[in-house]
Amino acid sequence: MWRLIILVAISVTVTSSIDCVKRRSTTSGDDGHYCVCNAKRCDQTPDVIKPQNLDEYTLITSNKNGLRFRVSKGLFKETEPKRNSKSRTQKPSARQISEATTATKIFCGSIKEKNVNPSLPGKIIINQTQTYQEILGFGGAVTDSAAINIFNLTQNASDNLIKSYFGPHGINYNFIRTPMGGSDFSTRTYTYAMTENDITLSNFNLQMEDYDYKIPLIKRAQELKENKIKLLTVPWTAAPWMKINNDWMNRDKLRPEYRQLWADYFVKYFEAYRNAGLEFWGVSSQNEPASYIYLRYMNFTSMAWTPEEERDWIIEYLSPTLQKKGFGHIKIFAMDDNRIIIPGWPNKVFQDKRARDIISGIAVHFYFDLVISPNFFLFNLGEIKKNFPEKLILYTEASAGIFDESKVILGSWKRGEIYVKSIIETMSNWASSWIDWNIALDMTGGPNWINNYVDSPIIVNSAADEFYKQPMFYALGHFSKYVPPNSVRIDTTTENMNNVENIAFSTSDGGVVLVILNLNEKKKAILIEDPEKGKTKINVPARSINTIKYWTRCENTDPS
């Protein structure tokens, strides 16, 4: 029998090539820090390189007290003979993921532990052989407001901002969501068919916001990422003349006689962006189609649908029109709304087999998740995976501050924790992506034509030619930088982890990534055990986000 030896790792700090210039918040209720960037200087996100000594791991830490992507290293101690390379589970196929859904527990969110003693070390056991969904990636939205703010900076400062998300030393975003036309994060209301009764769409035109802001910004990001960004789009509304009550707002619906015209409008948009050199990966039929139910007091530019109306329009108009016009490769998603309307909405959409054959999955928003857990017995993401195991679940919009009196809080560590908690909970419940809302806003959280201000991972102070990286930026980077596309979520079990959350992934380069969120006001000792690797003990600081990456001795593919 092998003797179990636990090695307490002694960390050796290694800083990134350019560190954060910290500024302490004077407005944050939780007394946080943010990082200042300008035309001459901006911090970078450290890479993790596969070490020659495969017993070594790299630990990336950020915390409330001002650490940002601090790098330290330690060693695992072997506990038993390593399995041979053939024992490593390969990245699962869609069929295997579907089978795992029915063979394993669906409700795989955070589980309350009994008899927790906070003075004792916690324990995380990683099981690489139990795999779940493939991770498609992380990203944010290029809205009119975001692009306007970025281009209000000088050239060098704006370049540093874009590189922070998409450059080789950035946080590795690979998704961009952009509105089809105007949204509330525009300076005005507009669509691309503003000519009354233009039923041939002969006057369809992209607008200044596309040509001067969104398209140049997206293309710059694509250049940095070598065209590896997945572009998503969704409309907020049709032109008022195409709607029953000639209204911009969210209680109005599309006129039935214009359903084909609305599908043609989508094609016109895709053709215009193709002519500008951009291709889309995915589209949703409508942003927040049910918002008229739960946001009656808000006057958003929007358009109301029932799930049956959305389903039938996709089946009868959108999908065949995209196929006919050469855009059949674009993935179609339904709902694109808050989780409070599931499982009812997707159940009604997918009860028609034709919809299941056409629609790739559902898109979900973040905004009510703070009060409703993803594995609550109602509004449950696991129910979607159980009922429709082949369908993707994308988280496509999130922002902090929407329900708070203070919209922008510079340095709010609590908001960074909220982001990490959401990513852990939603991806533990089958989400394959997590996409933030505006990638940059101004000091008020805008511009926004209806004053619906929110916070952003990056806040732009154009008067000083500076931008500020919020804790939310680093929270996202702890995932997006180190959990690349084609990673697969793997299983963890825990002991004595009071107010400490975690999630683990297998990466395509043969690595394992473990993210740990410590919500406690005290540091926590945690034993990490991987049967394919060994054991180590780490100390995670109070109020901290920690990403650990290591490689097992076996490869990710079977050489035979």
Image: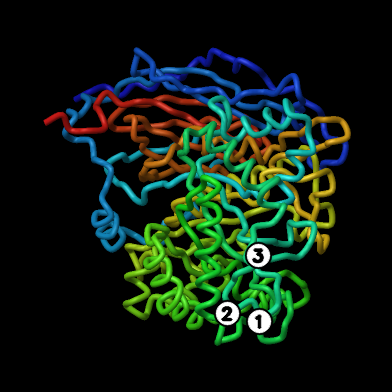
Q: Is residue 277 above or below residue 71?
A: below
Q: Residues within 10 Å of mark 2 (few under 14, many from 20)?
A: many
Colour scheme employed for the rendering of this structure: rainbow
Task: Give the residue number, with chain letter if any, for mark 2.
Answer: 305
The residue lying at 67 percent from left, 26 percent from top is 67
Instruction: Where is residue 511? Give x, y as percent.
Output: 36, 30
Q: Residues within 10 Å of mark 1 (few under 14, many from 20)?
A: many
What is the total number of numbered labels drawn onto the structure image? 3
The three-letter code of the residue at mark 3 reads Tyr
Report the amino acid beneath label 2: Trp
Q: Are marks 2 and 3 in contact (CB under 8 Å)?
A: no
Mark 1: secondary structure: loop
In the rendered image, which quarter contains the N terminus? top left
Asked if 402 appears above or below 241 in the picture, the reply is: above
Closer to the camera, 377 or 509? 509
**Which residue is label 1 attached to?**
243
Which is nearer the N-term, disc 1 or disc 3?
3
- The answer to whether residue 39 is visible is yes
Residue 131 appears at what percent x and percent y? 31, 47
Residue 520 at x, y percent in the picture: 64, 40
Closest to the camera, between mark 2 and mark 1, is 1
Say few, some or many: other residues with alpha carbon within 10 Å of mark 3 (under 14 / 14 to 19 / 20 or more).
Answer: some
Kind of residue at disc 1: Lys
State how far apart marks 2 and 3 are (Cα): 21 Å
Instruction: Give the camera-side residue of 206 and 472.
Output: 206
Q: Which residue is mark 3?
A: 192
